[in-house]
Image: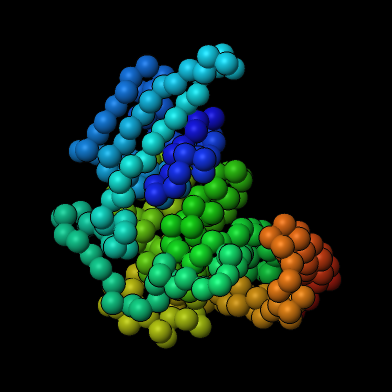
Amino acid sequence: YYQVLWLARPECCATWEPQRSLPKRLVEEFEDGMTVKSTAETEAVYGHVSSTVTVSKETSDIEHHETKRIRLDRPCCDDLEGSFRDAEGDKQDLTCRTEKDRTVRLNHRTAGILAGIWPCGIVTLISELFLAESKSQVYGHLHEFLQTNPEVVSNIKYICYDDGCHLKKYAGNKCRSDLTPTTAVLSKVHIVVDKMHMAGHVDSWCKKNCDPHLFADLKEVDTETCEQTFSWLSRYKRMTQKMNRHTFIFFILYLCELHNTRELNKLKRGEFLQ
C-alpha cells in the first residue's frame, strides 16, 4: 500500500491505497528511490488527476519502517471543466445541463448514496457520496467495484446512468483511460443514459453515443431499475434523517440485503420470466 496525499486536503486526510490503484510508472520510480517531478504528463488515482506529481520516500526513525507517499499537487484543467480532448486534440464539451458536480446540498454532510443495480433488481453496489454526486466520485466507486470484483467485468457490457454522457466523456479522457486495466475497461464499456432521462439530453454527441434506444441489446432491458428501487427506498427517508453516518450506512445495507432476498425469491419463482 502507498500513502496518497489528496488535492486541496491536509496531510492528516491522506489515505492508503493499494498498489493496483496507482499509476505503474510512479510506483516503479518510487521503488527505485527516485524523487520525481513531472509537468509534461498527467497521473491519476481513481479519476483524481494531477499535472504535477511529486513522489517522495520517507523513513521514520521511531517506527523504523518506510512510508510510501505519492502527492497529487495540481488538478488537470480538462478534469475540472468536465471535458476532454479527442484524438485530434480538440477540446470537447457537452450542452446537456445534466452535470451534478456543482450541485452541493447545503447543510448536509453527504449527498446520499450511489447504488449499482442489475436489471433484475439486485443491488450489487452501495457507496456513500459526499457534498455532490460528482462524476469523479461515481467513476471512482465504479472503478473500485470493478477492480475488487474482476469476475463481473466480463459480464458488463452497458452501464446506464442518468448523466451518462458526462460520465462517458470523463471515462474516455486520455488523462486516465490507460492508467490501470480497470480504467481501460471503463473507457471502452458502453455508458448510456437511461430511457427515462434521455429526453432531457439535448447535445448531438450525447444523442449519437448515449441514447439507449440505439442499442438493440437494451430494447427489452429495464434501464429504470435504479429509479424504481430508489422509489421504494425513499419510503424510509424520514427514518434516516436523525441517524449518524454509520447507523445510516448500516441501515441502508440492511434494507438492500432484505430487498435482494425478496428479488431473488421472485427470480426463483420465475416471476420475471412470465
Image quarter for residue 240? bottom right
Nearer to the camera, 244 or 134: 244
Relative to residue 130, is residue 235 depicted above or below? Answer: below
Nearer to the camera, 56 or 172: 56
Relative to residue 184, is residue 249 depicted above or below? Answer: below
Left or right: 35 as drawn, with respect to 271: left
Image quarter for residue 193? bottom left
Res 28 visible:
no
Res 104 visible:
yes
What colouring does the structure picture have? rainbow
Left or right: 186 as drawn, with respect to 251: left
Residue 95, given in percent of the width and then of the height, sits at 28, 77
Relative to residue 55, is residue 245 depicted above or below? Answer: below
Residue 34, given in percent of the width and then of the height, sits at 33, 19
Relative to residue 20, is residue 218 depicted above or below? Answer: below
Left or right: 33 as drawn, with respect to 148: left
Residue 223, given in percent of the width and then of the height, sits at 56, 74
Q: Residue at x 28, y 39 (%)?
A: 52
Q: Residue at x 33, y 77 (%)?
A: 96
Image quarter for residue 33? top left
Task: Give the number of marks.
Answer: 0
Q: Residue at x 22, y 38 (%)?
A: 39
Nearer to the camera, 233 or 5: 5
Question: Considering the image in quadrants, where does the C terminus appear?
Answer: bottom right
Left or right: 224 as drawn, with respect to 58: right
Question: Considering the image in quadrants, where does the N terminus appear?
Answer: top right
Nearer to the camera, 215 or 133: 133
Residue 20, given in percent of the width and then of the height, sits at 50, 34
Q: Residue at x 68, y 69 (%)?
A: 120
Farthest residue to the front: give it: 62
